[in-house]
Image: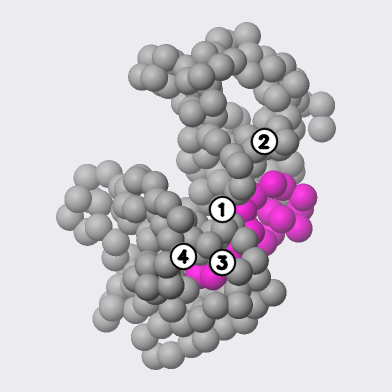
Amino acid sequence: MKKIQTQKQTIWYDDSILSESPEQCCDPDFWQQQNKVIGSAQGRGTTWFVALNKMDAALRHYRRGGLFGKIVKDHYIFTGWEKTRSYQEFQLLNTLIKAGVNVPKPIAARATKRTFCYQADLLSQKIPNAQDLVSILQEKSLSKEIYQKIGAEIDKMHTAQVNHTDLNIHNILIDDNDKVWIIDFDKCHQQEGRDWKKSNLSRLNRSFHKEVNKRQIKWSEDEWQHLISGYNTI
């Protein structure tokens, strides 16, 4: 990891992946001017998909959720560069990759200081030819083997003691080789103990139930047991 730091801004980046300008890589306008924007997705804000020289990437600006997010959309209290959300997620993704968990490669993280607050951005790998579980399950059911793979991947994450505080079926992807990926590690962290692992799984289970009612996904509680069997066999 390399770092560019000024009084108001710090950028961390992986120069083995990023051959484009690190100073501008977290600016959507830069990629638009280069004609390298290949798509976008809407969540709390817009995630831009861009074509780097070595891989496709997703550029995300950190935004708050909930009621407070309607008042303060994208500013966070600054308590140090290495405590910024972008730096923390960049480092956590590298920790997970070293542990053998399938997560996007972090490419660059930026934190920009605004007096007592900061804003943040993250550029990370766009998983090729992958869809989230919601999109897939709206079209078809998944096999027992895929659910076991999902459970096994979560188990690997938990073995690395990483608490995914927003584990839901939007944050689990399957690619065209049936490889399972876990994404979106904002506000996630390593944590000792085991009780939180049950909370992660309970949150994921609630997510399945929610999308059955909301989007009529093709899922039943029996399939949850396949996922748990994959989780317990590692």
Disc 4, disc 3: CB below 8 Å? yes
**Mark 3 belongs to which amino acid?**
Leu
Q: Residue at x 47, y 73 (%)?
A: 25
Whether residue 222 is visible:
yes
| Residue that label 2 marks | 176
Could you say which is closer to the camera, residue 225 or residue 163?
A: 225
- Of callouts 2 and 3, the N-terminal one: 3
Disc 1, disc 2: CB below 8 Å? no
**Mark 1 belongs to which amino acid?**
Lys
Residue 52 numbered mark, or none: 3
Q: Is residue 134 left or right of residue 144?
A: left
Q: CA distance from mark 3 to mark 1?
A: 10 Å
Residue count near mark 3 (Cα–Cα under 10 Å), binned few <14, some 14–19, many ≥20 = some
| Residue that label 1 marks | 126
- Of callouts 2 and 4, the N-terminal one: 4
Q: CA distance from mark 2 to mark 3?
A: 21 Å
